[in-house]
Structures are given as C-alpha cells and as structure tokens.
Image (cartoon, rainbow, N blue to C red):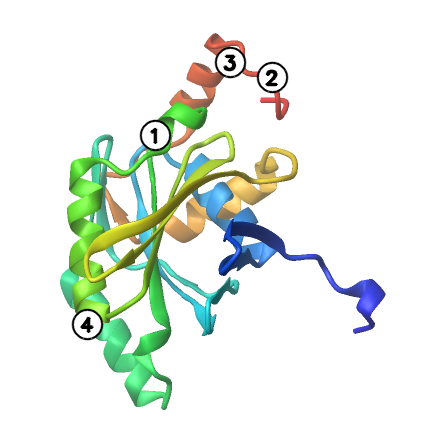
Amino acid sequence: MSEEEKVPEHKAMIDVRLAVTYDPALLRRLWTYTAAVDTEISGIGEVRIDGQNFHLPDDMHMLKQEGHIAGTHLDVSKVADLVHDFIKAGKTPKKLKFWYHTHPGIGRDAVYFSGTDTATIAKLNRDFGDPWIAGVFSRDGWSHWGISRQGTMIYEWDYMIPGTVPTEQELEQAEEFLKPLVQEWNFRSSSRRVLRRMGFRRHGW
C-alpha cells in the first residue's frame, strides 16, 4: 500500500511527551458495538507501545459477560482463557493493555469514569501491569479516555469519533456477534427511540 493509500490514524496529543493513535477501524467497531445495545458492554484490547507513543490497533477481544443498564461484568474465567490463549500462541499477554466499555447515554456528559470504573481500571492495571488505557463510549460517538499507572489515572481526555452514524447493516452484524456473549441482552430499538425523542440529528438517527 502506498503512502497515499494509507488510511490516516486518529491521534490524540495528550501533552508534548505523549501521543495516542487509534486505528480508525477500531473506533468504528467500538462505536458500532456501543450503538447496537442498550446495556453496558466491555472488552479487552491490545496496545502497541513505543516509548511514550501508544497505538491501539483493530485488535479487540469481546468476551463472555453480563451487561446491564448500569454496569458490565466480564467473565473472569474468559479473561484467564484469553491470557492462556496468548501464551499458547506464542504471543505476549503484555499487549493486553486496553479496557473498553460503554455508558448507555448520548453526548459528552455520558462518558466519564464512575467510581466503579475507576476501581476496575485500577484492578486491571495491577493485574496486567503499567501502563493501562481505558475508554468509555456513548451511543452518539463521544468517548472518554484515560491512562493509568500503578492504579492511578495520570491522563484523561475526551474524543469525538469522526464519521457518520453506524449503518443498519453494521448494527445488525454487531448484534449477531454480541448476542452470544452478553447476558441480560437488550436490543438497540429503545435507545434509538430515546435519541429521536431528544431531537438528536447530528448523525442522522
């Protein structure tokens, strides 16, 4: 692929010493997963680290979990299986450095780290080592991110995912993929009615 043909990566400059880049396909995938359900969901992703540069490729692991309107709980045994599979395949589980989850709302105010989120991030950081990246997504493309070291959040920032709202085909494919993984499943129909009632027009819902 030539330089002209490469898809540009989305980039967040945290400060002059540190930068985070996201694969556009990953952001699209996570936004679509978020819009496909009414419950909270979560997953573990990979991060490539080069000094103070962090890159999130389109390598996301959605595991068996419980999803509720006010929380998400990964199956601990499935997380252990993921680590075991990495080792078995000759891959280092040290690449597992990203926790994605959702909040069932819209707008910038819907994305933040709750007390429960903060405790979860600290635990994952302790279990998987430094650093740890977390991101929480809303249905309309807003996301909030943080980097944790030794269980303490050292950077946080907001990011609006570029692009149009996920298509019906994308949402249907996401539903079929997530259904077997998420207990207490709620479909997205009610979330779309809420968006319309609130007069949300930015992405054409």
- Mark 4 residue type: Ala
Q: Quadrant of residue 138?
A: top left
Residue sitting at x 34%, y 83%: 92
| Residue neighbourhood size for the residue with mark 2, other residues' Cα within 10 Å, grouped as few (<14), some (14–19), many (≥20) | few
Quick check: 93 above or below 37? below
> Spatial distance from mark 3 to mark 2, Cα to Cα?
8 Å
Nearer the N terminus, badge 3 or badge 1?
A: 1
Q: Which residue is mark 3?
A: 196
Asked if residue 151 lies left or right of residue 204, the reply is left
| Residue neighbourhood size for the residue with mark 1, other residues' Cα within 10 Å, grouped as few (<14), some (14–19), many (≥20) | many
Q: Which residue is mark 2?
A: 201
Picture disc at residue 104 = 1
Dot 2 lies on which element?
Answer: loop
Using the rendered image of the protein, determine whether residue 72 is visible from the camera's viewpoint. Answer: no
Nearer the N terminus, badge 4 or badge 2?
A: 4
> Spatial distance from mark 4 to mark 3, Cα to Cα?
41 Å
Give the quadrant of the N terminus.
Answer: bottom right
